[in-house]
Each structure stands twice: as C-alpha cells, then as structure tokens.
C-alpha cells in the first residue's frame, strides 16, 4: 500500500523566518537608536575647571566675578569713551574704548580723587587746568613705588581717532578704585624710564606723571 505524504503549506516555512526578523527588530529598538540617528553632542569646555552651570567658558577661561563701567568725558563734557573694569581671578581686567582722540600713544592712569572737573585747581593748590582736581596718580601702599599703583598700559589711538585697549593689573583692587578717577592724557607716558646712560636722571615730575602732559578725558569709577 502506497504511503501518503502530508505536505505543509508554504506559510509554515516562512513564519519562523518572519519571527526571527521581528525579534531582531525588537532587540534593536530596545533602548538603542539606529546608526543613522544623530546623537547628542557632549558638552565642550574651553577651560578647566568649567564655570558652574555653563557649557562653555569665557575667553581666557575665567568668568568675571565683579565689574563696573566708567564713562570718559572730555573737558567740554562730551563723551569720548567708556571703560569696563572687571575682577577676574586675582587681578583686574580693564577694557577701554575711545574715539575722537589725537592719534598716537596716550598715558592712561587711575588718579587719587574721583573729581572730573574742567579748569580745576590741584588738591595742593596751583594753577588750574582740566581735571587737575583728580590729583596725582593713585598710589596704594608704598607711596614711593614706581610705577604707581594707578599706572596702566598706554592707550594707542589709531589714525581715525579711535582706540581699544584690553589690559590687566594686580596692583590695585576693584574696591580700592571705587570713587577714583580714570584719566587719559594728551601725550605718551615714559613711566619715568630715563636710561642711566643719559646725563639727566628722571626728576620728581617725571617720576610722578610720566611726562604724559595735559588731561584730555576723565571718568569716575562708581
């Protein structure tokens, strides 16, 4: 007697294959993304350690802790620039931007008193002049130290009368500057730097002022 053979339907063979494929898709989607999905860019810091709560540090890697602004005016009262004084770590960073000045180098200093008065007399008396009531260069601690605590890098003015300077100092604190004046002078500051090979040594005025000349702009540090 001939034996009979039972034939399974074609879907019987295909079903296991589909089940395996479905299982693979389930495993891939379980907590994972396919490779064509963009991931999240990790935070990038420009300094170490990074500032708390930020993804990027500031230029130089330090965030200013405290700052104040100064408006610089000429003797007629017109605004010729601004200055920002910021505490950064253990020093100050001073940014000065100005316009309408004579091209060349100009002395830049903090002065003793926060008085920006045109045609005023010096505190010790004498002939009046613009912003003379602000007194001499600010001096903190050793009164005969050179350069003075208030001395800063000279401001270089371009041919169009504009200038920008970013400089630093650790000779004075922000608290010590409150109520003092920031002054731009008409000429360059030699910082009392007369070489010893010259027959003439720096005199008291040179040491005190740097021979930077008249005062052309002034602002009080608030």
Image: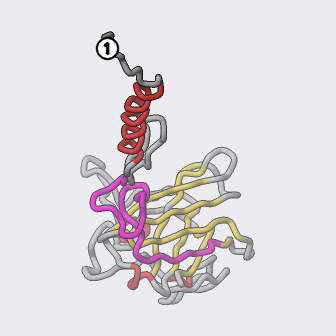
- Quarter of the image where one finds residue 145: bottom left
Of residues 47 and 93, which is closer to you in this image?
47
Q: Is residue 62 above or below residue 121?
A: above
Q: Which residues are magenta?
A: 44-72
Name the residue located 46 percent from the left edge and 74 percent from the top edge: 110
**From this viewpoint, is residue 205 visible?**
no
Q: Nearer the viewer, residue 181 or 119?
A: 181
For this view, does 203 lie left or right of residue 104? Answer: left
Residue drawn at point x = 30 percent, y = 49 percent = 198
Q: Is residue 52 magenta?
A: yes
> Predominant secondary structure in magenta?
loop
Check residue 199 for magenta coloring. Answer: no
Location of residue 115 (image quadrant): bottom right
Residue 105 image position (x, y, % from top left) = 53, 52
| On screen, residue 71 above or below 158 | below
- Pick the front one: 143 or 197: 143
Q: Position of residue 186 (x, y in %)?
A: 58, 61
Q: Residue at x 38, y 42 (%)?
A: 28
Looking at the rendered structure, the secondary structure element under dot 1 is loop
Residue 152 image point, x, y percent: 42, 64
Above or below, comparing residue 135 to residue 155 in the picture: below
Q: How many marks?
A: 1
Q: Which residue is mark 1?
A: 3
């Amino acid at each position: 007697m001939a034996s009979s053979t039972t034939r399974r339907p074609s879907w019987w063979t295909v079903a296991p294959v589909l089940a395996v494929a479905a299982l693979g898709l389930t495993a891939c989607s379980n907590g994972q993304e396919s490779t064509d999905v963009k991931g999240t860019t990790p935070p990038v810091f420009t300094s170490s350690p990074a500032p708390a709560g930020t993804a990027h540090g500031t230029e130089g890697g330090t965030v200013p802790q405290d700052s104040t602004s100064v408006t610089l005016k000429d003797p007629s009262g017109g605004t010729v620039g601004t200055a920002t004084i910021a505490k950064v770590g253990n020093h100050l960073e001073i940014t000065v931007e100005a316009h309408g000045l004579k091209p060349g180098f100009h002395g830049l200093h903090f002065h003793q008193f926060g008085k920006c008065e045109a045609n005023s007399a010096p505190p010790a008396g004498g002939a009046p002049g613009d912003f003379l009531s602000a007194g001499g260069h600010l001096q903190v601690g050793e009164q005969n130290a050179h350069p003075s605590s208030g001395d800063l890098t000279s401001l270089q003015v371009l041919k169009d009368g504009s200038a920008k300077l970013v400089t630093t100092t650790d000779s004075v604190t922000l608290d010590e500057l409150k109520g003092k004046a920031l002054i731009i002078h008409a000429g360059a500051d030699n910082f009392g730097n007369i070489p010893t090979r010259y027959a003439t040594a720096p005199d008291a005025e040179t040491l005190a002022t740097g021979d930077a000349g008249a005062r052309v702009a002034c602002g009080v540090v608030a």
